[in-house]
Image (spheres, grey):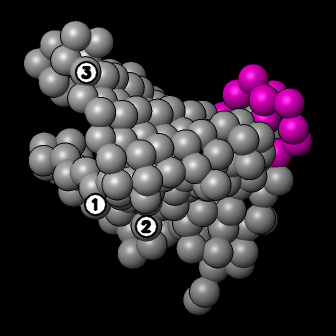
Amino acid sequence: MSLAPNRPLALALAVLALGTLPAALPALESDQDQPVYLESDSAELDDQKSLSIYRGSVVVTQGSVEIRADEVEIHHHPDRRPRLIIATGRPATYRQAVEGEAQEMRAEALRMELETDRDEIVLIGEAAVFQGEDRLRSDRIVYDRAAALVKAGASAQGKERVRIQINPSER
């Protein structure tokens, strides 16, 4: 199989089919330094529990990151920085620009858990990751951005088989 060097997801998916991924998609470093914006039909803010719940056509953006969901729970650190973001929807969607790539990374699942301290995204239920025409599907996908590691199916404690589609690169 021949993979073009500018197709990191294709390489990631090919290696993932054999086990785990040594080099995943590097997100834009500048995203974490940007402010977070939220839009929703309703919001509940509980300072005692360090919890915010947003319902109804929720949109969360930070730099190139965009999350869309029916409901988003944000568990905060004492300084109000997000610690855990849980997005649920039919499906909840995630997208982010990828360093050095023209195509953004997109993901969808019935539930997404973003752990900011570990820089990890867990996609649960009808999970899929897309970049361009390439795609990875399973019931559970774990993307550890800090370690540049993607796991799917049984290696991510899922129960379904992993389905991968890698399209030939354009020359």
| Residue plotted at (34% across, 54% down) | 41
How many labels were placed on the picture?
3
Q: In the picture provided, is 58 more to the left or to the right than 112?
A: left
> Residue 46: which numbered mark, if any?
3
Residue 53 appears anywhere in the view:
yes
List the residue tagged with mark 2: 104
Query: Where are the magenta residues, as a range?
Result: 151-162
Q: CA distance from mark 3 to mark 2?
A: 34 Å
Looking at the rendering, which quadrant does residue 7 occupy? bottom right
Q: Position of residue 121 (x, y in %)?
A: 49, 36
List the residue tagged with mark 1: 64
Which amino acid is tagged 3? Asp
Viewer-proximal residue, 81 or 47? 47
**Dots 1, 2 in contact, CB < 8 A:** yes
Q: Position of residue 103 (x, y in %)?
A: 45, 72
Which amino acid is tagged 2? Glu
Q: CA distance from mark 1 to mark 2?
A: 9 Å
Mark 3 neighbour class, 10 Å CA radius: few under 14, some 14 to 19, many 20 or more? few
Q: Could you say whether the residue bearing mark 2 is in a helix, strand or loop?
A: loop
Q: Could you say whether the residue bearing mark 1 is in a helix, strand or loop?
A: loop
